[in-house]
Amino acid sequence: MATVQPGRTVPAMRARPTPGPLNRRRLLGGAAYAAGALALPVGLAACEKPTDGGGGGGTVTFGSNYSDEVPKKAVAEVLAASGLDVKINTVDHNTFQENITRYLQATPDDVFTWFSGFRMQYFAAQGLATDISDIWQSIGGDFSAAMKQASTGTDGKQYFVPFYYYPWAVFYRKSVFQEKGYQVPKTWDDLKALATKMKSDGLIPIAMADKDGWPAMGTFDYINMRSNGYDFHVSLMAGKESWEDNRVKQVFTLWRELLPYCQPGANGRTWQEAAQSLGQKQTGMYLLGMFVGQQFQGEVAADMDFFPFPQIVEAHGQDAVEAPIDGFMISSKVKNVDGAKELLRYLASAKAQNAYLRSDPNNVATHNGADTSGYSALQKKAVELVGGAKQISQFLDRDTRPDFASTVMIPSLQSFLNKPDDVDGLCKRIESQKKTIFAS
Amino acid sequence: MIGLLLGLPLLLDLVLIWGPALASIGLSFTSWDGLGEIRPVGLDNYVNIVSNYPPFWPAVWHNLLWLAFLGLVATPFGLFLAVLLDREMRFTRFYQTAFYLPVVLSLAVVGFLAQLIFSRDYGAANALLGRTDNPVDWLGDPSINLWSVLLLVGWRHVGYVMLLYLAGLKAVDPGLKEAAAIDGANEPQTFFRVVFPTLRPVNVIVLVITVIEALRAFDIVYAINRGRNGLELLSVLVTDNIVGEASRIGYGSAIAVILLLISTGFIATYLVQVFRREEDQA
């Protein structure tokens, strides 16, 4: 039941979390919901019967990448309750992503599922998305400024409606921290001191996995944003800064300080394996997205907690939070504009988000007024974390060009983990590749 | 009627093989993201690939290593097994089945098995070797992971080659061996001077299969780690660049053309040799 996509999605991302063996409870819950969905009077799955829909009128087509069982049922249920005649066209998550370029040019659905940030801006700038600033005039008050920013294209107009997100943070087991008297580290020095202590206690301080190529991007992003700030992250990802800049080299240098405390052999380990090592108390901390929860159940799941990535430079504090947002857009070849906008207004409502998260609890709603009473402790904490964030980043591979992320950054970060000493050479190689890619 | 029988395959060949190949060559001189206009860039893609794409040379090297390993280690070993099994020893059927079994598995499945065996933390290999304290990172360490993979690829290739040679050996006229024995040849002489030359048709097939397997290698490394970090192959780089959101279609086409040139090199060498030999015989 891989209900969550990790905060990444380069093409390579066929390595989505494999359905965890766990979470029976959730699975049963999902099944119950699925049963509920089937029992709904409007046969959603088929969706042939037009409902006496709202203002839109006519059928709205909905291109969905919610292909895993639980999200698929959840979104179907939500759309069924929209009061509109929605025709869902579900495509496997990775296939959807790989074909997005061709899909949007050919015969896209009216509304389609997508990611915020650069990933959204890129297609908006290509003229493949419909401007929905008018929707934002009515729903703007329901979302934080950061959410609105994440939905805004390079031209200042809105193209995206956020649905849910899943923040990245450092996960740990409460019982381990209690037993050994560890304190949550607030600063970089605290983090290193804690890691040293864990090491002397026989723990591997920091779990690390990058076999799939994307998890290490989270570490890069956080060190970068903590030492250089969110704005630098954005312009670096947009190709406006040089990777040979000392600020970038500083990121790798700081990262190198952590490596002696990290689980060795990261390039041969999947994030699931690293998560297991955290669950088994072999490792002490693990920086990952909330979807790490898929790997734990019962007692261990209840024992999980997280803290925000520590401060490195005071000026940037712990301001930025990495929290990839999934949501919806309207294609430029939309056939039923009114219906599509009506549907987006509905999906932007607290009601729709509540309904969705009841069935798929690995995420957090984007709507300010969403009902959080049913949230788990971690979900509540995630809301606080993101609510208190001054900026929200989307993750390296969502904040930059997909070709740069997949063909340059993945091999580069893996080679850094193999040979952390050649920072100058690494940055030089990244920069020279970046130049040709961003020039194309 | 003959025109149709010849024309149809020819047409399919043109449309399905030469069309895309020529399109790739054309696109390799352009920059195209699949969305905007196709912009000619001359040789830029090629220059970039050889000078400014770190995974490229490792990929070429890995493809050649792959070929060398299959050709010089796995194939001879397959032949060796075939010769052994041809001697009607006990349990021959069992051995044949055992060696052939991996061929039935797709390389993607073999890739999955690789995880179970070679995973650093949970794999069987480290457990069997007792390396749990200081585990070997079979698949994550770029200096050894290619060899772990080649071991599995070889495991599969050996069975395939063995079966082909076994069939070939069964077809060798026993009279030849008897004649050689009567002439006083010892066993190695009999094999290398008499039996092996008669296997020439099989040798050709095995050679072609070996070259094809080495150049089209893709699925196993893709199943293991998407062909990165020590497991780069040209086929993977083509896929990485063309398929997916990356959509560097011109760039990826240029890599595909390079792969095409390498394949053509082997095919040309082979054809030249075949023709030369036929001329000699004529």
Image: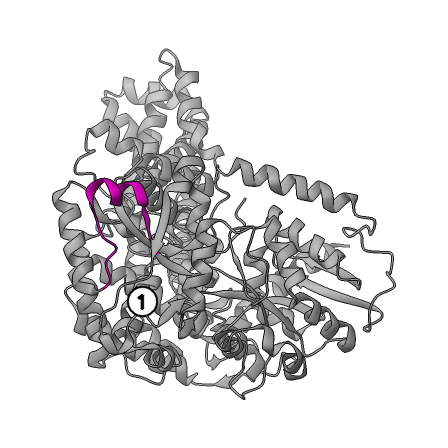
- B14 relative to A363, above or below: below
Residue B117 seen anywhere in this rendered image of the structure = yes
Q: Quadrant of residue B15?
A: bottom right
The reply to whether the magenta stretch includes residue A334 is no
Q: Secondary structure at mark 1?
A: helix
Q: How is the image coloured?
A: one colour
Q: Which residue is mark 1?
A: A222
Quarter of the image where the N terminus of chain B is located: bottom right
- Where's residue B153, x and y in %? 36, 41
- Where's residue A169, x and y in %? 36, 58
Which sits in the foreground, A248 or B106?
A248
Tell me the chain of label 1.
Answer: A
Q: Quadrant of residue B114?
A: top left
**Residue visible at 88% across and 63% down in the picture:** A52
Tell whether A419 sits left or right of A5: left
Q: Amino acid at mark 1?
A: Tyr
- Where's residue A26, x and y in %? 55, 41
**Residue visible at 56% across and 78% down in the picture:** A123
- Where's residue A87, x and y in %? 77, 60
Tell whether A66 sits left or right of B33: right
Residue B149 seen anywhere in this rendered image of the structure = no
Tally of marks: 1
Residue pushed farthest left? A200
- B270 relative to A237, above or below: above
The reply to whether the magenta stretch includes residue A180 is yes
Which sits in the foreground, B257 or B226?
B226
Residue pushed farthest bottom? A155
Q: Which residues are magenta?
A: A170-186
Which sits in the foreground, A166 or A101?
A166
**Residue visible at 36% across and 27% down in the picture:** B82
- A33 relative to B196, above or below: below
